[in-house]
Image (tube, grey):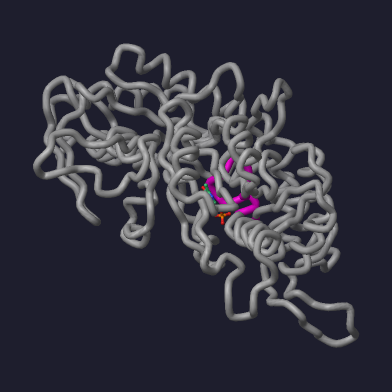
Amino acid sequence: MNKFFKDPRFAGIEPFEKKVWLSSPTMHGEEQKWVDDAIKTNWVSTVGANINEVEKQVAAYAGVKYAVGLSCGTAALHLATKLAGEKLYGQARPNEGTLQGHRVFCSDMTFDASINPVAYEDGEAVFIDTEPDTWNMSPEALEKAFELYPEVRLIVVAHLYGTPGKMEEIRAIADKHGVLIVEDAAESLGAQYKLNGRWVETGTLGDYNCISFNGNKIITGSAGGMFLTDSEEDANKVRKWSTQSREAAPWYQHEEIGYNYRMSNIIAGIVRGQLPYLDEHIAQKKAIYQRYKAGFADLPVKMNPFDEENSQPNHWLSCLIIDEDAMAPQVRGEQDYLYVSVPGKSSPQEILDAMAAFNAEGRPIWKPMHLQPIYRTHAFVTAEGNGRGRTNAYIAGSGIDVGADIFRRGLCLPSDNKMTPEQQDRIIDIIHRCFR
Ligand SMILES: Cc1ncc(COP(=O)(O)O)c(C=O)c1O
């Protein structure tokens, strides 16, 4: 029997009959109509009316001239990163990436899909620490990074969990150093940011911008993503690369490397059915965030923060972070973990285990990239400078590592927009009991 069922702290709590998900697809019916339409008209391919329509609608929603439908957000990020690399360093040989021999400043606390395209293009990611105000790239650490690596010409920045980062500061730093920005808005479609006094959508804040329609996102096509831009030339280039880079010849003629990254008309049909509900999903996610915030008011935890004056998150995932003095001991290995239950305290792993025991899905915060085995040898820069090798066996004190701290004390809460208030109250109750 599950240990939580025997634990007197959880007496009287019933497991959810149906699993409460972190964030699952929410269908409305119209998706089926557009998928059926594609099949009936035989546009079961990477061309068709659904693709044309969602490209038009998303461009209009985001306020950009062009949206290019792609197979996933990762494909969008790859082509955006390649476009930036080609602009900065020229066209690469077919067997080489455009970023070969070049460093790129990257968000550290994000999904690896944000920054893996730097490696696809043979570049070397330098990870920039996180700031505590929005849990996104720290402008202070970014400035420090330019002191250490003044030759860098590209930044890849993500908005975590639907909360816009400090883009005004990041853009100012980028302009000062004459560098380009790839914006990863995969998690933040519909989130808004006040840039120089004007409200704009995330996904329009970089030189190359990407969104995702992954199954867990605020709206979904089951998969799919988009590249957003005001540049017709860039839009055409991404569309060409995504369809195997065919030249204008009667046969298949190729002068540059191609990819099979185009969005399918079936996926576009699902996205087409979802788009009218984007704002409704955001409102539901916001209500979930606020209900958690009120429910945790008496606990030693905080919700994931955002800039209330200059941003309107889409609240894709609600998260909490445990106050330092309420953290029970917890250690994480490469693939396992151990924690101790202490009265009045708890830990992310205990809360995640408790929620799982009662059939609700949470998730640890994205493990920062500079801590990932694959990127362990890459540079990491904090607001204090070089973030590697900061401790000293003979001298007390250690440097800051904001991302590692949020990973240690934070977690993502069930944020499914089909979760009922009663279900959410039970989750809030379970978390209260973890601190008993
Ligand atoms: C921050 C971030 N970037 C990129 C991606 C990749 O998007 P996709 O799954 O559509 O390839 C995701 C999610 O999956 C993400 O959360």
| Image quarter of the N terminus | top left
On screen, residue 315 versus residue 19, left or right, reads: right
On screen, residue 112 versus residue 387, left or right, reads: right
- The verdict on residue 213 being magenta is yes
Q: Position of residue 81 (x, y in %)?
A: 62, 58
Main secondary structure along the magenta-highlighted residues = loop
Q: Is residue 226 above or below residue 400?
A: below
Q: Quadrant of residue 60?
A: top right
The residue located at (66%, 34%) in the rendering is 190
Q: Position of residue 208 (x, y in %)?
A: 68, 50
| Image quarter of the C terminus | top left
Q: Residue furthest bottom?
A: 251
- The verdict on residue 273 being magenta is no
On screen, residue 309 versus residue 21, left or right, reads: right
Q: Position of residue 118 (x, y in %)?
A: 53, 60
Q: Is residue 235 above or below residue 63?
A: below
Q: Quadrant of residue 355?
A: top left
Q: Position of residue 398 (x, y in %)?
A: 21, 36
In this view of the protein, which residue sits in the foreground, 278 or 411?
Answer: 411
The residue located at (27%, 21%) in the rendering is 432
Which span of residues is magenta-colored?
A: 212-224
Residue 287 visible somewhere in the drawing:
yes
The residue located at (61%, 68%) in the rendering is 98
The residue located at (49%, 38%) in the rendering is 143
Residue 355 visible somewhere in the drawing:
no
Q: Residue furthest top?
A: 298
In this view of the protein, which residue sits in the foreground, 229 or 60?
Answer: 229
